[in-house]
Amino acid sequence: MRGGEADRAPATARRTGRAGSWRLRRLLTGAALVAATAGAILAVRQIGAARIVSAVLSADPKLVLVGLSLMCLAMATRAFAWRAILAATFPGVRIALPPVLRATSIGVLLSATMPARVGEPARAMIVARNVNAACPRAGVLSRVLGTMVSQTILNVVALLGLGVLTFSTYFDGRFGPLTAAIVLPLAIFAVALLTAPLVVGMLSRRRPGSLAERIEAALAGVRAGLAVFRSPRPALEAATGQLGAWALQCLSCYALLAAFGLDRRVGLGAAAAVLLAVNVSAVVPVTPSNLGVFQAACVVALSGVHAIRPAEAVAYGIVLQAVEIASAVAMGGPALLREGLARRELPRPPCEQR
């Protein structure tokens, strides 16, 4: 009896610890949401809701559609790049573009409409399921997650390029809020990226149990996902597709600047600044769909440096986020229905057979 109680005690402690951690995360998320909501309300009251609505209604619908089309094309181009990475990671397996495009679209849809960027693991699971259906093998999901690390590396290169374009266009010696909003998250990300191997090595040496084994399996998947950089042709396809998708998104942002008539006052560097600011601010999502924070990033990028009125900057942020969500729904909605039908046709993984 005492042995059973001793065995149950660690499990009870773990459950209590998880519950406490979950409550703390909810408390922090709620506090961040309240702070973001209060800040948004104060900003709207100071700028004037009527001015923001008037600015939104002044956007040229034709150019908004152009921006929407470019955003959809960027999503498809991103799927092309991911397919090249997957093909290098799974040699001998036919990686078709349609399932990868569906997974990409579903990932963007879920990340754009739900908190905590749940679209990232969702798209990995969808691709892993399709790869398993074509050629069942062990460790597919960890390898797919590894390919997403390759995408992240290319995304960091694209962000650096946007930073160069942004500051070379209008840098005048004043760093200002835009630089702080961009450099600080990127610095944190770089420190985490550099220290991760050291932490993993320490855990592997000191704790040789199941945790270390899972970490080693994850690292093996990451190494497999980086295989694309060992072959010139797949690497070129992946880099061209991923960076091309960022270029299309930048053009979409510029088309929306033109929709508001702001292109006559700012250039392509402003579109790059907006794209850079909204993506860096989304690294740690604070609100659902990053609502409010997204518009604040646009205000920092446009009003903080250029002579763009805050009402116009907020209206631009509203329309830009609406375009992003519309493109996610237009491409992710049908893809989600298609994958839902296909899921019943495929055998379920063991973890789902309950």
Image (spheres, rainbow, N blue to C red):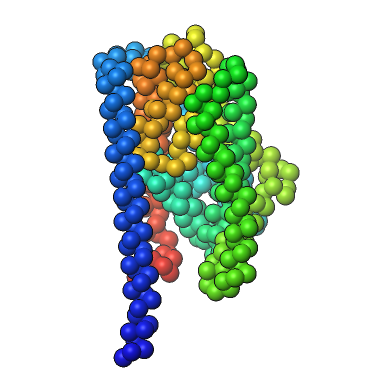
Q: Indicate the position of residue 232 as horizontal and vertical percent values.
A: 73, 44
User: Is any part of residue 213 visible from this angle?
Assistant: no
User: Is any part of residue 55 visible from this angle?
Assistant: yes
Q: Indicate the position of residue 290 as horizontal and vertical percent values.
A: 38, 37
Q: Indicate the position of residue 235 as horizontal and vertical percent values.
A: 68, 43
Q: Is residue 281 left or right of residue 240?
A: left
Position of the N terminus, as image quadrant, is bottom left
Above or below for 338 versus 270? below
Q: Residue at x 37, y 22 (%)?
A: 314
Count up the numbered dots.
0
Above or below for 22 versus 267? below
Above or below for 219 versus 82? below
Q: Residue at x 55, y 34 (%)?
A: 183
Above or below for 232 versus 71? below
Q: Residue at x 32, y 37 (%)?
A: 35
Seen from the viewer's position, the closer of residues 11 and 222 is 11
* Furthest residue toward bottom: 1
Seen from the viewer's position, the closer of residues 346 and 2 is 2
> Would you identify the image quadrant in which residue 78 lies?
top right
Seen from the viewer's position, the closer of residues 10 and 217 is 10
Q: Residue at x 63, y 49 (%)?
A: 194
Seen from the viewer's position, the closer of residues 133 and 114 is 114
Position of the C terminus, as image quadrant, is bottom left
Q: Indicate the position of residue 184 as horizontal and vertical percent values.
A: 53, 36
Q: Is residue 56 left or right of residue 144?
A: left
